[in-house]
Image: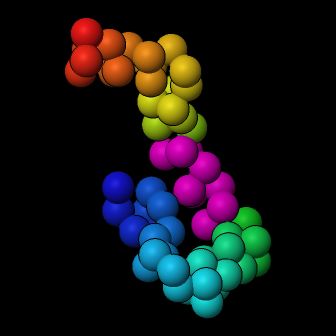
């Protein structure tokens, strides 16, 4: 994942950086649309069937 292309990163615990990233997305519909595409492509990785498959593969 690349910051600004696939996601907006904010340092852990940095509330100001997180709020700035949220504002950027809220204020920029083109950025929101650009971030949406990679998120949709990766979203299946966070579905329960995929989590269960990965868990079984690791701990079998």
Image height check: is 53 above or below 3? above
The part of the image, by quadrant, that contains residue 57 is top left
Residue drawn at the location 67% of the way across and 81% of the way down: 19
Q: Is residue 6 visible?
A: yes
- Up-down relation of residue 6 to residue 3 (above or below): above
User: Is residue 1 toward the left or the right of residue 6 in the image?
Assistant: left
- Where does the image place residue 35, in percent across and percent down from the top left? 56, 56
Question: For this rendering, which residue is in front, 49 or 5?
Answer: 49
Tell whether position 32 is magenta.
yes
The quarter of the displayed image where residue 56 is located: top left
Q: What is the quadrant of residue 53 in the picture?
A: top left
Question: Which one is nearer the viewer's eye here, 10 or 27?
Answer: 10
Query: Which of the colour schemes (rainbow, by chain, secondary structure, one colour) is used?
Result: rainbow
Which residues make up the magenta segment?
31-39
The residue under the point 59% across, 78% down is 18
> Is 50 placed left or right of 17 in the picture?
left
Please tell me whether residue 31 is drawn above or below residue 55 in the rendered image. Answer: below
């Amino acid at each position: 994942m690349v910051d600004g292309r696939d996601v907006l990163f904010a340092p852990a615990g940095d509330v100001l950086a997180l709020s700035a990233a949220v504002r950027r997305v809220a204020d920029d519909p083109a950025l929101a649309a650009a971030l949406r595409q990679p998120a949709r492509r990766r979203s299946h990785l966070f579905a329960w069937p995929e989590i269960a498959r990965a868990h079984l593969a690791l701990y079998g």
